[in-house]
Amino acid sequence: MAQTNNAENMLSIGQVQAREPTSLSVEIKSSQSDNSKKDAPSLFRSGRLHIVLCILFCELCERLTYFSIAGNLVLYCTSTLHLTSQTAATISLVFSGTAYFVPLFGGWLADSVAGKFNTIYGSLLIYVIGATLLPVISIDFGSGYKLSDSAKQGYYMFALITIAIGTGGIKANVGPFGAQQLDDLGETAIQTFFNWFYWFINMGSTVAFSIGVYVQQEYGFALGYAIPAVSMIAAVIILLIGKIWYIIKPPEGSPLTTMSKVVITSASQCRHPHIDAPEMNSCLDRVKESYGGKFPDKTVEEVKSLGRIMPIFATIVFYWTIYFQMSTTFYLQGERMRLSYDNFSIPVASLNLFDSIGILVLVPIVDILIYPLFAFCGMPLSKLQRIGVGMILATMSIILAAVIEIARKNIMQEGGWMIQELAGEKFNASTLSVFAQTPQYLVVGASEVFTVITGIEFAYSQSPANMQGIMMGIFLLTTGIGGYIGSLLVIIVNAATSALGAEWFPDEINDGYLEYYFFLLAGLMLVNFGIFLIIAKKYKYVNVKQDSTDESSSVAS
């Protein structure tokens, strides 16, 4: 959970950095001299703190809303909408996938048409429609005015669509918009902003996964969904409060538009060999000015360079399928484990906090100890090697989930079971504590440190300067595709196993074989890892600094 937030933060940084035309460094480069940097006021002494706080609190409210809705999405679908477990899991995966598809287009809209402020404001208004609709359809108006299940399902899907569109438009632009207010203050002020930006993101998600999901589970969704609705309305008000102070720039055009034109034009001209230049090794070369095309050679080469990175991204897609098990299969498993202790019921979605703990603990350890130790021993871990480590950890997390599922069911078969009620829905649950899931969440968090953080660093450092924002958006796009693949996999597995007479993922998972599904995911992840190794072995790093040395060699070295 938290590392996806970190991905959003890094995406925002990447979009800001992509404005710098001469820098390929992972670090933010300021055009100011060292002396002017020293003289530049800090964020807290700049007189703009009130402006920044409007943006930061707006982001906090948005993240609180999103995770309050996503956290118990599966429970709402099964308890209120009376959908099956596998349908609930599919909806959760598609919702998450869509929320990470939209940012690429939200960034394009802001850069090419509407500008960042208008895109954020418009996205918030769309968001409010969905967020306020949820508590309304959750209210019990009595038998005379009660909505049918099909009507509730229709309104709910509409609400999720508007929320996914809204969050995507905000996610792509709110970080860069905040940094835009501090452009003239230098690197230090911008870095301070993003540090606090990430803090506010995690504060919002922490409140959602503690208070928000608890109210929904224990007091009902009408009240529980009212919290994110009010939070979203507050986000709009807070954003508008600062409008009189914001630095609002008009759209300047998006590199995504240019890239699309290059690809589409080259595809239309790629049917026959080029008579005058048979040595061309790419269809994209046809649109170069040097070969009679209409695009500068440098622009075409920048687009071609993205093709080197795409195969790596393709192997990261299935990582996200594993990641999203936290909000689907892990959640369904947790519902059927012991949650009550001394009249206090632990919210199932709160287990996501252990994912955050894994990240918060491991980040300083790898930064201060593990990476420097490998470098000291003459074996520095390359970016692709670190991504591979994260993939292995993701595989371990899903194997742990399978082991816990076997233990959970064995305990129930031996008589260790109980009736457990969550949001009005009763479950046959194992007496095995839900805290037995802690290791699988912690290991997912550890995998994010290696695969997600390093993946963002890899995408940014290996991209041309004016394509870095696009590459950050494409990296988040892999998240969305991973969610869609996960939903498709649920459908395929259910259809195949039903035909064999032993459904792995039935409506009541106590009657199925969820452990087999986990082992299948682990096996597919290992196959994906094997493909990654082949691609990574052949990959050649691009020198992103004048003084770069070892990083330009193969990942295998």
Image: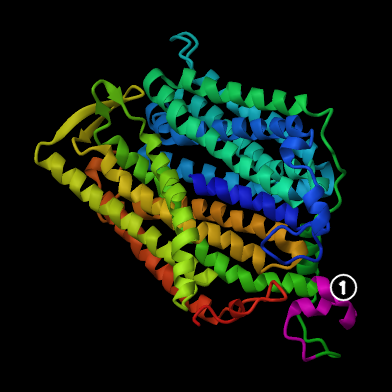
Instruction: Indicate whether 185 appears above or below 216.
Output: below
Residue type beneath disc 1: Pro
Say which quarter of the image contains residue 165: top right
Q: Position of residue 472 (x, y in %)?
A: 65, 57
Which residue is nearer to you in this view: 89 or 34?
34
Residue depicted at 58% across the width and 82% down the height: 553
Which residue is nearer to you in this view: 154 or 233?
233
Q: Position of residue 487 (x, y in %)?
A: 46, 50
Say which quarter of the image contains residue 268: bottom right
Q: Position of residue 539 (x, y in %)?
A: 57, 78
Indicate yes or no whether the magenta region holds residue 284: yes
What crowding class fits label 1: few (fewer than 14 Cα within 10 Å), some (14-19), or many (20 or more)? few
Asked if residue 500 lies left or right of residue 352, the reply is: left
Task: Determine which residue is flagged by label 1.
Answer: 296
Residue depicted at 53% across the width and 34% down the height: 203
Which residue is nearer to you in this view: 237 or 426?
237
Does residue 79 appear in this view? Answer: yes
Asked if residue 283 lies left or right of residue 377, the reply is: right
Asked if residue 475 lies left or right of residue 422, the reply is: right
Magenta stretch bounds: 278-299
Residue depicted at 69% across the width and 76% down the height: 547
What colour-coding does the image apply?
Answer: rainbow
Q: Position of residue 231 (x, y in %)?
A: 60, 24
Q: For numbered disc 1, what is the local secondary structure?
A: loop
Does residue 97 appear in this view? Answer: no
